[in-house]
Amino acid sequence: MRKYGYMKPMEGVLFVDEFQFIDSIKQTSYNQASIIKGIGDDAAVFRSTNSDIVTAVDTFVEGIHFSEQTMEPFHIGYRALAANISDMAAMGAIPKFYLVSIVIPKQATKQVLEQIYDGMKTIANEYKMDLIGGDTVSGNQLTISVTIIGQVPFGKARYRSEAKHKDIVFVTGTLGDSQAGLHILRNELHCKGNEEFIQRHRMPSPRVDFSKSLWSIERIALNDISDGIANELREIANASRVSITIDDDKIPTSSNFEQFSLTKQYEWKYFGGEDFELVGTVSAKDWDKVQEIALKSNVRITKIGRVSFNKDMIGQVFLKKGHCILPLEKRGYIHKVGE
Amino acid sequence: MRKYGYMKPMEGVLFVDEFQFIDSIKQTSYNQASIIKGIGDDAAVFRSTNSDIVTAVDTFVEGIHFSEQTMEPFHIGYRALAANISDMAAMGAIPKFYLVSIVIPKQATKQVLEQIYDGMKTIANEYKMDLIGGDTVSGNQLTISVTIIGQVPFGKARYRSEAKHKDIVFVTGTLGDSQAGLHILRNELHCKGNEEFIQRHRMPSPRVDFSKSLWSIERIALNDISDGIANELREIANASRVSITIDDDKIPTSSNFEQFSLTKQYEWKYFGGEDFELVGTVSAKDWDKVQEIALKSNVRITKIGRVSFNKDMIGQVFLKKGHCILPLEKRGYIHKVGE
């Protein structure tokens, strides 16, 4: 079937010259030596002889996952690929290739599309990734679907199901910043650390290097924070058949986070999505090593809780707040930007 | 990021129970031994040590690529995956895995979604493929984006750029049937061979087995017919820097094709898409072998023309009609079902 190189005649005809547009997004050279055929045939071809292959797809719909009110087209592209790269980090994999399928509404201009692709290309280059395929079709609603392909040494992929009784629970970076940034953008606020919060929302930094450095650790459970830590911990607890308790005092937040109301802080820390930090669990004996790796990778890491096994509490997540231990509610981040 | 297993709270809430739906599409066992982790983590993991990996993505939008007027939801799913499988056949690859990203409008019912996935599952099982990932989001317009991953022995992928001067041009099966089927459905006609035409439109048969059997041929250029043979030949001619001449008398059509007007026959044969047959070129010395393989694979094959090199005609496709040779117009199949 026709892919980039020849768009279907009916499709996308309204945004200037199709061929010029395709040329503008097509890579002229590839970062990955394992690529055999990039864009320009029915499919892309690459070789992988020493690694397992890791793949996922994520779709972003205008009005649900992004809005032009809070994001430039460049950021829409940047963040769409960042979210996928974060999935690779959560698997312990190195992102290598991506394919982009885009549904283009009639009103979209060539400039907007080029900026979206430019955003993707910018973060792709940071990670030496290659765009190897895609599809461009017309429709009512701008929709970007990104398939990502990564590699990990044989047997080194990280799963949510690896948490064990007495493991230490850790998280990278600070939580809630992306939601603070979104809040600032939506309400056109002027807060302390405005730029930092906005940057964290628009151009998140997936933890690929740190995750790669963890390959030397024998066992680790990993998840990335796309829908709030409460949800991600529950995924680990369910997959590993354990329960997890975290300490409210320990949750790392950035220095300007306290200016927001306590309700907002609580909401954003636990249920705010899209920080794209990593949360994981590791045995106490390996904790020092994980801390060393974090230091070397220049990543802040914080011990926030413990894993435990009790057959009546499988899949549950608890929050220690002062002298109380409460169940952390079961709800995730609501992807709805148009509020 | 969350994938199948936990849909985002805002998304898909309107079609009954999300978890039940996910359970209904999730595979309980996998056909491919190389799968390490299927659905249920941030990404899927598989191993490929002896093959090159081939991947592509195709997106299908309601009202553009399919319509409920002419397709049951089952066929929408079946055909979406068939189109992707056909891309693998065009590359000489064996389809192995697929990921599905679906944008679900509010009005979609659980039944419709299940039938779409059922259609995909049906053809996936025919080819022993596994569903290894996906994403489910809400939006205005039903959109199905399928990423396919296949494998081919090292260096055996087939490209459009392999045609050479004096090659024989061949095509599998018969052309124009899918468009005849669409025409019958749109106009609620009763024609000879109704069922066959409709079947060819709704449930095409990608030529994977035949393509696999061609591995023994050293050089071959291949393309699948998704947008009309005129376009696919032009892609080969451009990629290989040659020109191609085909003979109007030789184009294979099915026995009941003649009942349609000459204008329609011409349109559907050359510019009608979605027959998902293969068109290719091969040296004259290998032609007998290709015919033998076709016979063994139970695939009709027809020699329809020749490749030639003339530096002033690179990328051009000609049609021999009686005593005349005419340039075959440069236009492809228009994916627009709602006419």
Image (cartoon, coloured by chain):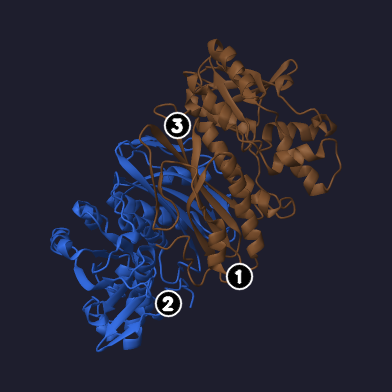
Chain colours: A blue, B brown
For badge 2, the amino acid type reads Lys
Q: Which residue is mark 3?
A: B152
Q: Which residue is mark 2?
A: A330
Q: CA distance from mark 1 to mark 3?
A: 41 Å
Where disc 3 sits, the SS reads: strand
Which numbered disc, 1 or 3, marks the residue that appears first in the sequence? 1
Work out whether residue B38 or residue A112 is closer to the camera in this orientation and state it. B38
The residue located at (42%, 46%) in the rendering is A25
**Residue A306, above or below B125:** below
- Across and down, in percent, residue B200 comes to 71, 38
Res. A72 in view? yes
**Residue A253, above or below B281:** below
- Which mark, residue B16? 1
Work out whether residue A201 or residue B230 is closer to the camera in this orientation and state it. A201
Q: CA distance from mark 2 to mark 1?
A: 19 Å
For badge 1, the amino acid type reads Val
Q: Are marks 2 and 1 in contact (CB under 8 Å)?
A: no
Quarter of image, res B102? bottom right
Q: Are marks 2 and 1 on the same chain?
A: no
